Amino acid sequence: MMLTEPDIHANAKFWLEVADAIVKFIALLVGAAWALMNYLRGRTYKRKLELGITGKLFRRNGKLYLSILCRLKNVGLAVYPIKQEGSACQIFAFMGFKPEHVRTYPVFTDHGWIEPGEQIEHPLMVRIAVDESKLVGLQIKLIILSGDIEWNSSCIIEFPDPDQPGAGK
């Protein structure tokens, strides 16, 4: 018959296993909290489109033209449908204190949606037929509808004063 000696470290091994389990559980909670915080703060997964619009006013053959470039970039991780009805590029002329609507153009008509990370552009060339003696500047507005969300962007283009030096015709 063989006698076995009692393990004098059994109590210590038990408490080391308990401490190991507690440390692993705390590490799991900290990792989950960190991932959740990055998810919520990072805005990567939220709906997000970036709009951009630029314009350049120029004269050819005595007529005033406006070159416009509308840009749309999907910086999120979801596909966005582009609702054609309501999406537009609007031009307003400042002839005094109140801007006057000049014209509205459809934009991104070749695109029904925009993929994650995709950027699309829509160029426009527009003749501006207004009284140039009263024209102060132009405002261009880009409106994009996607589902129930409306995104807007705008820019102002100054009309050069013909009396200032460097403002050629």
Image (cartoon, rainbow, N blue to C red):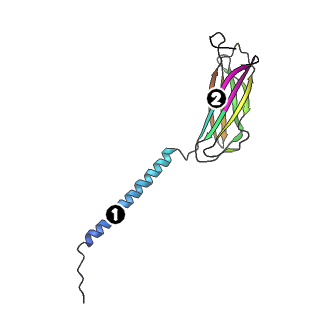
Left or right position of 11 against 134: left
Provide the residue designation for mark 1: 20
- Label 2's element? strand
Above or below for 68 versus 18:
above
The percent coordinates of residue 36 (x first, y second) are: 47, 51
The amino acid sitting under disc 1 is: Asp
**Residue at 63% over, 47% down:** 79
**Residue at 32% over, 63% down:** 19
Q: Tell me the tag on residue 58.
A: none
The percent coordinates of residue 41 (x first, y second) are: 48, 44
Q: Main secondary structure of the magenta part?
A: strand
Mark nearer the viewer, 1 or 2: 2
Using the image as rendered, state which of residue 160 and residue 26 is in the foreground: 160
- Label 1's element? helix
Q: Quadrant of residue 151?
A: top right
Using the image as rendered, state which of residue 134 and residue 61 is in the foreground: 61
Above or below for 157 versus 69:
above
Provide the residue designation for mark 2: 54
The percent coordinates of residue 112 (x first, y second) are: 71, 44
Q: Quadrant of residue 123?
A: top right
Left or right position of 145 against 19: right
Using the image as rendered, state which of residue 110 and residue 88 is in the foreground: 110
**Residue at 23% over, 85% down:** 3
Position of the N terminus, as image quadrant, is: bottom left
The amino acid sitting under disc 2 is: Thr
The percent coordinates of residue 45 (x first, y second) are: 55, 47
Magenta extent: 53-69
Per the model, the C-alpha gap separating discs 1 and 2 is 60 Å
